């Protein structure tokens, strides 16, 4: 997986989420949370292939950057799954009338996506690594993650 595509997608999510948060706080509209959640689930299911944000990042933004840095895919998919769960939970909370909790979850999502996009630190990947070190995620799920010699090659 191209790290720059993941970082670009995260930047798109930051911008969209900030817009949804601003509109939601002013108008009370939270239905766009469902669109953010759908985008995450599409990326979890098929990578950038089905996701408008993923396609924009992969086919428009990254080629203009001219950069490519391959990283292990399983931790990034794990991070996308966390984003899908957080955004879905936020959408559900807004739908059942718990908007302050929904906006809080969206804020956490914005922080995590900002760390990925602007600092290159993938919080979900870090959690994946800790779970793999603890034996909760088997080493075979990501051989490159658990074998330092493979990471260098």
Image (cartoon, grey):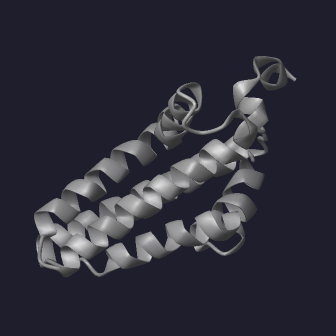
In the depicted view, which residue is nearer to us: 17 or 85?
85
Q: Position of residue 119 (x, y in %)?
A: 49, 32
Q: Residue at x 54, y 55 (%)?
A: 80
Q: Is residue 32 left or right of residue 37?
A: left
Q: Position of residue 55 (x, y in %)?
A: 68, 68
Q: Is residue 152 above or below residue 15?
A: above
Picture coordinates of residue 58 (x, y %)?
71, 59
Front residue of this view, candidates 114 and 71: 71
Asked if residue 6 lies left or right of residue 119, the reply is right
Query: Is 96 left or right of 52, judged from the image as shown?
Result: left
In the picture, residue 86 is in which quadrant?
Answer: bottom left
Number of numbered discs? 0
| Residue 82 in the figure: left or right of residue 96 | right
Q: Is residue 74 visible?
A: yes
Q: Name the spot of residue 72 as percent of width and height, x first.
A: 73, 40
- On the image, which quarter does residue 25 sit in? bottom left
Q: Relative to residue 26, is residue 57 depicted above or below?
A: above
Residue that appears at 24% across and 77% down:
30
Q: Residue at x 61, y 52 (%)?
A: 77
Q: Residue at x 44, y 47 (%)?
A: 113
Q: Is residue 71 visible?
A: no
In the rendered image of this protein, does residue 147 appear above or below residue 77? above
Q: Residue furthest right?
A: 153
Which quadrant is the C terminus positioned in? Answer: top right
């Amino acid at each position: 997986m191209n790290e720059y595509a993941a970082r670009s997608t995260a930047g798109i999510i930051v911008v969209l989420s900030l817009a949804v948060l601003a509109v939601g706080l002013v108008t009370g509209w939270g239905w766009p949370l469902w669109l953010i959640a759908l985008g995450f689930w599409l990326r979890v299911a098929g990578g950038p292939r089905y996701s408008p944000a993923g396609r924009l990042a992969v086919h428009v933004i990254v080629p203009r950057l001219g950069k490519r840095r391959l990283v292990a895919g399983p931790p990034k998919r794990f991070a996308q799954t966390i984003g899908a769960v957080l955004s879905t939970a936020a959408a559900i909370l807004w739908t059942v009338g718990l908007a302050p909790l929904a906006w809080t979850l969206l804020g956490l999502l914005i922080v995590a996506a900002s760390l990925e996009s602007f600092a290159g630190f993938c919080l979900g990947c870090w959690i994946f690594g800790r779970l793999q070190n603890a034996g909760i995620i088997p080493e075979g799920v990501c051989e490159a993650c658990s074998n330092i010699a493979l990471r260098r090659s």
